[in-house]
Image: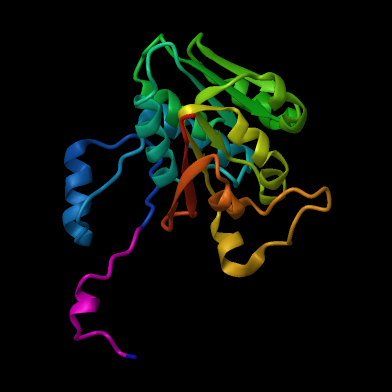
Amino acid sequence: MDRSNTAEAAHTESVVDLCFEGEISAAEVARIRRSVGARTALQVPPAVGAAYDRARRTGFTKSSRPEVGALMAVLAAAVPAGGSVLEVGTGVGVGLAWVVHGLRGRTDVDVVSVEIDDGNAEVASRADWPPWVTLVVGDARELLPDMGTHDLVFLDVPGSLKASVLDEAVTALKPGGQLVMDDMNPCWNGSRAGDDPTGRRDPDRLLEDPRVVCAMLRYSSGMILATRLRD
């Protein structure tokens, strides 16, 4: 159906990612917005940009998209004093950089990030992380049961591994704590492989977990945002 002359077409929006070699000024961002007719622009902070640069240099292609990272920064900013953040799947540190950006220099929150791949972990460790950030190399399936509870959990691992640690990730939430699980579009678009042979669940079955209340965020890479119910 041709919608070119309908009201619906007038409200159709697209998200476009533009990458630049270096940091650009606010004036330049405004000029680009005007030139392409963009309604708004999400700028990547310098430290996060450095993390994306690490990903490009090393050929790592699974970093969090800026829209996902911005959400993580917002949620990190809401973590209470004395709280903690857990990231499962450091990669080369893009998602972690967004979390650190959201905390804006606070020293009253601990952040732990777990990465199973030695090479990725080594690349991520080259960044200048604050002293309250801890990088852990290991298998989250073995580590999570002993890592305590957290105010914010970011589950950022491939789909099969998401399913295998989902129960533990929900258990790791404090009452009122929030969980973000991204890269859900392949699952929602029919690419799921079915239940894990060990009896674990498809990642999107988090929506059925009675311990949490969830929202499906169908933009960017596709996310589920969940909050652990209070007892």
Seen from this angle, which residue lies furthest bottom?
1
Q: Which of 45 and 131 is in front in this view?
A: 131
Where is residue 180 drawn, in percent x and y?
50, 40
State whether residue 110 appears in this view: yes
Q: What stretch is highlighted in magenta?
A: 2-15
Where is residue 134 drawn, in percent x and y?
59, 15
Magenta segment main secondary structure: loop
Quarter containing the N terminus: bottom left
Where is residue 163 drawn, in percent x and y?
69, 47
Q: Nearer the viewer, residue 188 or 137?
A: 188
The coloring applied to the image is rainbow
State whether residue 89 appears in this view: no
Q: Does the magenta stretch include residue 5?
A: yes
Residue at image x 23%, y 61%? Answer: 36
Residue at image x 70%, y 19%? Answer: 146
Q: Is residue 126 left or right of residue 70?
A: right
Q: In which quarter of the image is residue 155?
A: top right
Q: Does the magenta stretch include residue 54?
A: no
Residue at image x 32%, y 64%? Answer: 14
Say if 201 sits above or below 98 in the image: below
Where is residue 139 drawn, in percent x and y?
76, 30
Residue at image x 19%, y 58%? Answer: 35
Q: Is residue 106 left or right of residue 54?
A: left
Seen from this angle, which residue lies furthest right?
197
Q: Nearer the viewer, residue 197 or 59?
A: 197
Seen from this angle, which residue lies furthest front?
231
Q: Quadrant of residue 143?
A: top right
Q: In which quarter of the image is residue 145?
A: top right
Q: In this view, does 41 lie to the left or right of 73?
A: left
